Image (cartoon, grey):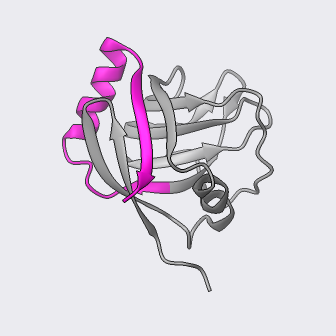
Amino acid sequence: MTPPALPLRVHAGPFVFSAQLERALAPQTCAAFEKLLPYKAQLIHVRWSGEGVWIPLGDNHLELPYENHTSYPQPGQMILYPGGISECEILLSYGNVHFSSKFGQLAGNHFITLTSPGTQLAELGQLVLWKGAQDLLIEAA
């Protein structure tokens, strides 16, 4: 039996969001990410994908299968691309996203959903776009 969704708190720049790990939909991705909690990084604006912010993870290739994968994450959804034809990365959608890289369209595993994004999600995206990288902390709630 899959454990229930794990509640998270996401600190992104000056904003704080409630979120959950989507254990039932992406169990292997969630299990791998859960080992990294609390997770600290910086968000930068995407280059090819549209209205999203991302965390480049470089040449790390996580040995994860596609699960609950999408090329069109909805606002408030975080996806993890485990690496392959492009670098490993995490992307957070704040608007219209068509997930891609310089190599073309990609699909990432939807593994976290922000449950209280409200209008602050779009504000976060605009902050990163116009003011640059913002600190990120994801922790268990």
Picture residue at 55% right of the left edge, 78% below the top: 3
Q: Considering only vertical position in the picture, is 34 above or below 36?
A: below
Picture residue at 27% right of the left edge, 43% below the top: 16
Image location of residue 6, percent across then percent down:
46, 67
User: How many numbered discs, if any?
Assistant: 0
Q: Considering only vertical position in the picture, is 77 above or below 6?
A: above
Residue 73 seen in this snapshot:
no
> Closer to the camera, 39 or 63?
39
> Closer to the camera, 76 or 32?
32
Image location of residue 102, percent across then percent down:
67, 21
Residue 72 seen in this snapshot:
yes
The residue furthest left is: 119
Picture residue at 64% right of the left edge, 62% below the top: 31
Image location of residue 14, percent across then percent down:
25, 31
Picture residue at 80% right of the left edge, 50% below the top: 63
User: Is residue 51 a member of the stretch shown in magenta?
Assistant: no
Q: Is residue 103 left or right of residue 131?
A: right
Image location of residue 44, percent across then percent down:
46, 22
Q: Considering only vertical position in the picture, is 3 above or below 111?
A: below
The residue furthest bottom is: 1
- In the image, which residues are magenta? 112-141
User: Is residue 125 a member of the stretch shown in magenta?
Assistant: yes
Q: Is residue 41 left or right of residue 57?
A: left
